[in-house]
């Protein structure tokens, strides 16, 4: 089983897609296991996308034509 901590995954979505789709895709990956409590984040400028922000489109926050999103575990 692959750990999300040590893996690179690539996903391509159209600009109107909501970040929730990306979040759902990450949660469905093999190796996600119990790590389903996470947020998506960009590295620069540092922005954490959670809650209502997941419903916005990728284009709404400048994540097109290309972006890298990090998986950030939530504090328990």
Image (cartoon, rainbow, N blue to C red):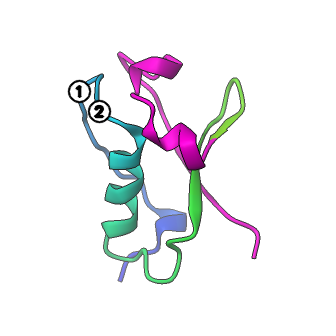
Q: Which residues are magenta?
A: 49-76
Q: Is residue 60 magenta?
A: yes
- Residue 19 position, x and y percent, is 41, 40
Q: Callout 2 environment at 10 Å: few (<14), some (14 to 19), or many (20+)?
A: some
Percent across and percent down for residue 40 are 55, 47
Placement of the N terminus among the 4 image quadrants: bottom left
State whether residue 33 is above or below residue 38.
Answer: below
Marking on residue 17: 2
**Is 68 situated above or below 2?**
above
SS label for mark 1: loop
Picture quarter containing residue 57? top left
Residue located 31% across and 74% down the image: 30
Q: Of the residues tagged 2 and 1, which is closer to the observer?
A: 2
- Where does residue 61 sit, x and y in percent of width and height? 52, 21
Rendered position, 43 above or below 62: below
- Please tell me whether mark 2 sits on a helix, a strand or a loop: loop
Using the numbered discs, state the Cα–Cα distance from disc 2 to disc 1 in whole angstroms: 6 Å
Q: Nearer the viewer, residue 56 or 45?
A: 56
Q: Residues within 10 Å of mark 1 (few under 14, many from 20)?
A: few
Determine contact: label 2, label 1, CB under 8 Å.
yes
| Quarter assignment of residue 71 | bottom right
Task: Name which residue lies at 39% across and 77% down.
Answer: 31
Residue labelled with disc 1: 14
Tell me what residue is drawn at x 23 percent, y 27 percent.
14
* Foreground pick, 47 / 51: 51
Tell me: 68 left or right of 10: right
Q: Is residue 64 a member of the stretch shown in magenta?
A: yes
Q: Position of residue 33 (x, y in %)?
A: 44, 82
In the displayed structure image, the side of residue 31 where residue 43 appears, left or right? right
Which mark, by number, is residue 53? none
Q: Residue at x 39, y 18 (%)?
A: 64
């Amino acid at each position: 089983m692959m750990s999300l901590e040590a893996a690179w995954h690539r996903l391509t979505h159209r600009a109107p897609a909501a970040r929730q789709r990306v979040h759902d895709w990450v949660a469905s990956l093999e190796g996600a296991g119990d790590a389903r409590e996470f947020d998506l984040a960009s590295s620069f400028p540092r922005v954490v996308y959670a809650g209502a922000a997941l419903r916005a489109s990728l284009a709404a926050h400048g994540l097109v034509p290309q972006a890298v999103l990090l998986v950030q575990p939530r504090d328990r």
